[in-house]
Image (cartoon, helix red, strand yellow):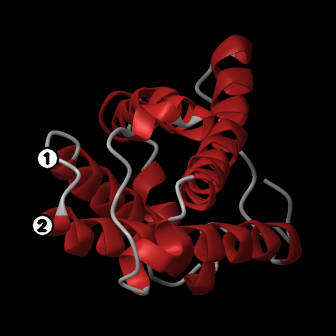
């Protein structure tokens, strides 16, 4: 670690990290819960909530990435294996990319299906099947890939915390740095 490198992330980075966690989890739960529902009027409220959370997630992830580039951050923690270290760095960027693509594919689906005027304007009906739209296929492909990447990320964090005992989780929490 260099002398100027902080030991933990800036509180703004910590806040944005955990806000993204909550938003992605919320969007996933809402999306999964309504995926089996018929496309009728009862689906409008959860769909509106899912869309709103998705848009907020996009805004937060973009701000988070800009903040990540601008603010000082701790050096990468080594897992003691060059391949694992490379994978760890790649997973962090892949998480940004998949969250970004998930939100953009959702917005694309929304536009293709005319959802803004249906969901928020009350004009028209939901399409019979969202799978008629190309963006739905992408949205549906990214969701499980993102879920698996999140599991890998969480697993690696616990590996660092419990097996390597390097107190990695303290870096992504509030405290003196």
Q: Position of residue 10 (x, y in %)?
A: 64, 80
| Residue depicted at 72% across the width and 70% down the height | 62
For residue 65, side relative to residue 2 (left or right):
left
Q: Which residue is tagged 1? A: 37
Q: Is residue 150 above or below residue 152?
A: below
Q: Is residue 163 above or below residue 121?
A: above
- The C terminus, quarter of image: bottom right
| Residue depicted at 72% across the width and 31% down the height | 90
Q: As rendered, which of 165 and 20 lies closer to the eye?
A: 20
Q: Position of residue 3 (x, y in %)?
A: 85, 67
Per the rendering, the mark at residue 104 is none
Q: As rendered, which of 106 and 134 lies closer to the eye?
A: 134
Q: Is residue 87 above or below residue 127?
A: above
Q: Are marks 2 and 1 in contact (CB under 8 Å)?
A: yes
- Disc 2 secondary structure class: helix
Q: Earlier in the sequence, mark 2 or mark 1?
A: 1
Visible residue check, residue 9: no
Please, which residue is most extreme toward the front here?
124
For residue 127, side relative to residue 63 (left or right):
left
Q: Position of residue 168 (x, y in %)?
A: 47, 50
Q: Which residue is tagged 2? A: 42
| Residue depicted at 51% across the width and 75% down the height | 116
């Amino acid at each position: 670690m260099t002398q100027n490198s902080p030991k933990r992330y800036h509180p703004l980075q910590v806040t944005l990290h955990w806000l993204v966690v909550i938003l992605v989890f919320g969007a996933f739960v809402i999306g999964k819960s309504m995926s089996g529902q018929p496309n009728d009027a009862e689906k409008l409220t959860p769909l509106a909530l899912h869309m709103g959370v998705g848009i907020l997630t996009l805004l937060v992830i973009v701000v988070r990435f800009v903040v990540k580039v601008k603010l000082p951050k701790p050096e990468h923690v080594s897992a003691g294996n060059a391949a694992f270290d490379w994978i760890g760095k790649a997973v962090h960027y892949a998480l940004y990319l998949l969250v970004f693509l998930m939100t953009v594919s959702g917005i694309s689906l929304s536009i293709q299906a005319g959802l803004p005027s249906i969901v928020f304007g009350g004009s028209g009906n939901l399409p019979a099947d969202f799978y008629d739209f190309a963006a739905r296929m992408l949205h549906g492909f990214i969701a499980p890939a993102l879920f698996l990447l999140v599991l890998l990320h969480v697993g690696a964090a616990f590996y660092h915390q419990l097996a390597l005992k390097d107190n990695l989780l303290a870096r992504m929490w509030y405290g003196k740095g």
